Structure formats: structure tokens, C-alpha cells
Image (cartoon, rainbow, N blue to C red):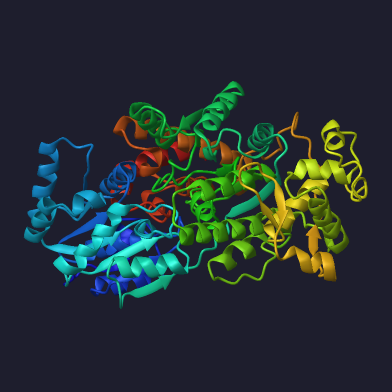
Amino acid sequence: MTTDRDPKSILREVFGYGEFRGLQECIVEHVCGGGDALVLMPTGGGKSLCYQIPALVRDGVAVVVSPLIALMQDQVAALREAGVRAAAVNSSLPPAQAWRVIGEMTAGRLDLVYVAPERLVTDGFLESLGRAKVALFAIDEAHCVSQWGHDFRPEYRGLGVLAERFPGVPRIALTATADAPTRGEIIEQLGLTGAAVFVAGFDRPNIRYEVVDKIDARRQLGAFLASRHDGESGIVYCMSRRKVDQTAEWLATRGIQALPYHAGLDNSVRSANQQRFLREDGVVMVATIAFGMGIDKPDVRFVAHLDLPKSLEAYYQETGRAGRDGLPADAWMCYGYGDVVAIRGLVERSESPPERKRVENLKLNALLGYCESGECRRAVLLRYFGEQHAGGCGNCDTCLNPVDCYDGTVVAQKALSNIYRTGQRFGAAYLAAVLTGADDPKVTSNGHDMVSTFGIGGELDTREWTSVYRQLVAGGLVEVEIEHGGLRLAPQAWPVLREGQQVRLRRERKIERVAGRKKTPKGRSIDAVLGAEPDRDLFAALKARRLELARARGVPPYVIFHDRTLVEMAAVKPATLGLMACIGGVGEKKLEAYGEIFLGVIREFR
């Protein structure tokens, strides 16, 4: 049952937006009408509105399943700023306060309640829901229910009970990333057979994708930040806790507000660091994959990977935390042969059943293909999720600086033959030394200065041969021996060696100097959007005022207004409250609370 409130009116009056985007309107109408839905929409695509607006249209309270306390707190704070009656029930609340929220829920005094999956399926909470009028259930980060997903959480499996206990209540499951097996398991585990499936597309055109050859990862990262993201917020992912700590410390010595985050830190330290990242501008979080899911910070201007993620799905999810506001952002990855060995080792040494390992290796192979491809990054990434892209996106490294690909059959034959001649037990660096005829004591002591492949690879240098071996691994012609990182021939290698089956390879780009690079004139991605210096100065003043207000209210700055809203203010420079109301993201409640304050800042620049 629905109220007489119109979704478009709510969109404008509460959330401050004039029009729905993409599939939002279809999804909202479907759920408002009582239909179940599975929604796949990229991060930053507006998933939250797909259940928040139906929650305000339908009678009763919407129950939102969310996996993280930080996400609940941010969403609740943002909704309250917009005038929506929202609350959360989680382990951070004292029992008396939690029961107070539950009482308000059953009494019909709340529009939305956020709850963790493990709390929702308890007998006590389900009984409380039975006494409430429930408008809908929204299951966020729904890929967590799938064992094939990258963030599997067993507690999500219990959510299937909602279909049994509340058969007439619509359920909407939402995720930013799910391949075909993951989608199938979401539907099966949550009892969503017959639900409408909305796939909004996975493209994030505002994100620039770039993969660089790992030479000196930290110094490469430092150059990347100095040249493009000076003073901006971002996330740096590392594989190990030790590397997280070392990288954060190194960045701090260079004057960057860098904080570590991993499971080995004390809970209070993790929480404090996360709060600083969410509530301050220009903080860089250096983290393991323990950080990020559900982080609602819209002004993350970059996500950098110093190590290879586990799959393209994980990569897409992690990079999707950049540029949620739709403004320019970077997804930058530093990738090397050692990463392949490390990830393969994690998969093979895990206690997963053989089928699980097989799937994880297939996912890793797809990621390696992405890294080594000379094709448009966006086209490769979207193809993995079943979405076609013509390529030539103009916003990835291979489009902006096209890769030279060539017939590498002879080069591949030399590389493969070298693996065979040296006993199929050495790594890429050693094999490159043999091919280039290096004066290396290890090569001599093993007698490999006498094999037929010694010195036959003079057309390439050591770095280029290492790249060839990476490409052969990515192409499935070479396998990695887990314990010591040695390379051996895969069955697919023999048609190349014996029959001359063609192999296409890409040439390595010349090494860019990573030290002493000067910052470009537009060293911050936001400057490229604002253009004129007066607009950039006004934007900085608006941000400063927003930060003051956020600190006074104890909320993250983006809960007041997103960067995108401030960018529009700086460009349009509204002179009246009526004109301010036309700025995207300025709803009625926020106009009343902050309109005159921000108009005052703008007047100083007119």
C-alpha cells in the first residue's frame, strides 16, 4: 500500500534533484507498486534512492540491511539532514537506546531503520518487525550472500527468512558488482525468484583507469599523487598489513595526511582513522581490503592499488569507491610479476575446495588479461560483466597513450623454449638473464650459459623479457609454480613451439622517471572541472565553510553537501534562495538550514 506522495516530488523536495537518472525511475515505480527487485547499479549510480524514495512513498517503515556500522551512520546522518526520520540499530548503541529505536519503529515514528544482517534475523528483532508495519526490505551489498562473490558474509544467508515471514512485503536487493554466478546465487539465497532484475550498466565514465609496470611502487605512487591529487582524498590498497603500515608512514614523511587501516590495528585506532578519513578533507587511507565496503564518502578522488587485487570483480568494487559524486577520479594500479605469484599462492594454499580454487584462478586469469591488454581498459572491464563497449573511451591509459602491439610469435617461442631448456623451475628475472646473456654467477653455476637459448634474446632488455613472461602467464601459455615462483609450460604452449601458432604481444612503454616530477598546472582533478581560478577559489571557500558546519554538527562534510553540489554553486553563483534551490543536491530542508550561509560565501566572490 502506498501514500499519495509522488516520487518525483520527493526527489526534488527531499533530495534536491530535478530528474531521476537511468533506471532509477523504473526501479522506484516497481518497488512502490510492491514488486521485488534485484538491482545492479555501479557505485555512485544512485542505488540508495531506489529504496529511500519508495520508503517515503509506501506506508510503514523501510528496513535496510547494511553490513557496516560506518555506512549506517553516514546514511542515517544524511537522511536526517534531509528531514527524513531515520535511525540505525547496531552494536555501537547501548541496549536501552537500541530498544528505544525499535520502539519508535514499531510505533510507526520512523521512515527507515538500518540494521545489520545478524541483528535482523534474531528472534527478538523479527518479533518486533511482526508488530510493525513494514513498507519494504532493502538488502544492500547483496553480493555478500554469494560464495562466488568477493565479500562473502555467511550471516547474509539467513536473510532468506524474510520471504517466509513477510510474504507480502517487497524486497529489493542491491549491489554494484555481480557476475552471472553471483547474481544467480543472490536470487536463490534470498528467495527472489520472479523478482525483476535491473542492470543499470557497469560503466563509470568519470573514472580514468591506468595500469603501470611496477618498478619502485612507493616512489611511483608518490609521483602519481604529487602530479594529480595533491591535497585530495583517496584510498591506497596494499596486500599485507606490514606494507600498509610502511606505505602510510612513508607518505606521511612526504607531507601527506596518510593513515593505516587493517585488521591488525586496535579497534579504537581503526575507528579513529576511519572517522578522520570520512570527516576531513585531503586524508589518504592506506588499507588492506578490510577497508572500503559500504564507505559512502563521495569525494574520493583516487583509488590506487600497490598490489594486484584478487579478481576483476574485486578490482571493480574497490576502484568504484572513487568518484561517487560523478566528478573526475583515477583508478591507478601498479602491477608486477611478483603480484601474480603472490595471488596464485594465496589461492592454492587456501583451504577452499577444488572447485572454488578453480573459479578463483579463472577470475585471476581475467584480471591478468585486463592488466596485460593493449585494448581499451574500459572495454575489457565491461566485457567481463557481460556489457559491450566499443572501446576508444578516451579516459584510460591505453586510449590516451595507445599501446604498440606486434606479432610476437618468435619472441614467445624463444621465451617458452628458454623455460623448457632451463628445467621449468626458474622465475621471470632469471629467465630474462639467460635470454639476454647476462654475466650472472647464478646462471653460470647452473650451467645455463651453455643452453641453446643463452643470449638469443638480445632484441629485448631484461625488463621487456619480464613483461613478455607476464603476458604469457596472462595468456595461459605459462603456469606459475606456487612455492618458488618458477615458470613451467602450460599445455597451450606446445602449439606455439611446435606449430608456430601466432601470439600477439604488446611492447612495454618507456620507463617514466618517478623522482623529481613537477606537479602539473592542474595537479588536482577538481581543478580541471572548475576551470577559472576565481571559481576554484570560491569552491575552496565553500568547502571551508562546509567543514566548519560539519564539525559543529559532528557529521562528515559530504552529509551537508557533496563536492558536486559545491562545484555547481561555484560555477553558477546563485544570488537568491530561489536560484539556490535549483542547485542539484539542495532540497527544501537543506535550503532552509544552509541556504543563506552559503549565499553569504558566494556574495563575497561576486
In percent of the image, x 34 and y 60: which residue is there? 49
**Residue 270 drawn above or below residue 363:** above
Answer whether residue 423 is visible to the viewer in this image: yes
Q: Is residue 429 left or right of residue 595?
A: right
In percent of the image, x 38 and y 54: which residue is there? 152
x and y, in percent, of residue 441 in the image: 85, 31
In percent of the image, x 65 and y 48: which residue is there? 481
- Residue 169: image quadrant is bottom left
- Residue 175: image quadrant is bottom left
Q: Nearer the viewer, residue 523 or 194?
A: 194
- Residue 174: image quadrant is bottom left
In percent of the image, x 82 and y 34: which residue is there? 442
x and y, in percent, of residue 19 in the image: 41, 65
The residue furthest bottom is 194
**Residue 573 drawn above or below residue 206:** above
Q: Is residue 302 left or right of residue 261?
A: right
Answer whether residue 3 is visible to the viewer in this image: no
Quadrant holding the N terminus: bottom left
The residue furthest top is 253
x and y, in percent, of residue 384 in the image: 57, 65
**Residue 246 drawn above or below residue 506:** above
Q: How many marks?
A: 0
x and y, in percent, of residue 117 in the image: 25, 52
